[in-house]
Image (cartoon, rainbow, N blue to C red):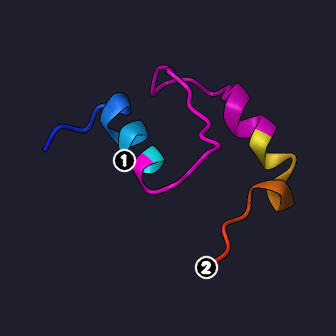
Amino acid sequence: MRQSLDTRTDALKAAGITRIFTEKISTRATVRPELDRIARRPAAYTVSA
C-alpha cells in the first residue's frame, strides 16, 4: 500500500475531516513548527466519538 501524504490527506477528507495539519520535514528535524502549534492548543483539536 502506498503511504504518501496525498493518499493520507485524501482518506482523511473522505472521512469528513476538515482541519488537517501537515509538515513536510526531515525525520531528523528536532523543530516541528506545526506539531508545536497544535500542541499549544490541544482542546481546540480534540476528536469526539
Stretch of the chain drawn in magenta: 14-37
Pinpoint residue 21: horizontal percent, then vertical percent.
62, 36
Residue position for label 1: 11
Is residue 29 magenta-colored? yes
Question: On residue 49, which mark appears?
Answer: 2
Between the residue at mark 1 and the residue at mark 2, the CA separation in whole angstroms equals 18 Å
Q: Residues within 10 Å of mark 2 (few under 14, many from 20)?
A: few
- In the rendered image, which quarter contains the C terminus? bottom right
Taking depth in this image into account, of 6 and 36 the one nearest to the observer is: 6
Tell me the number on the disc at residue 42. Answer: none
Q: Amino acid at mark 1?
A: Ala
Q: Residue at x 52, y 54 (%)?
A: 16
Figure check: 26 above or below 14 = above
Q: Residue at x 86, y 46 (%)?
A: 40
Quarter of the image where one finds residue 6: top left
Give SS at disc 2: loop
Q: Please tell me which of labels 1 and 2 falls first in the chain.
A: 1
Residue for point 65% across, 43% down: 19
> Circle 1 sits in a helix, a strand or a loop, which is it?
helix
Residue 23 falls left or right of residue 38: left
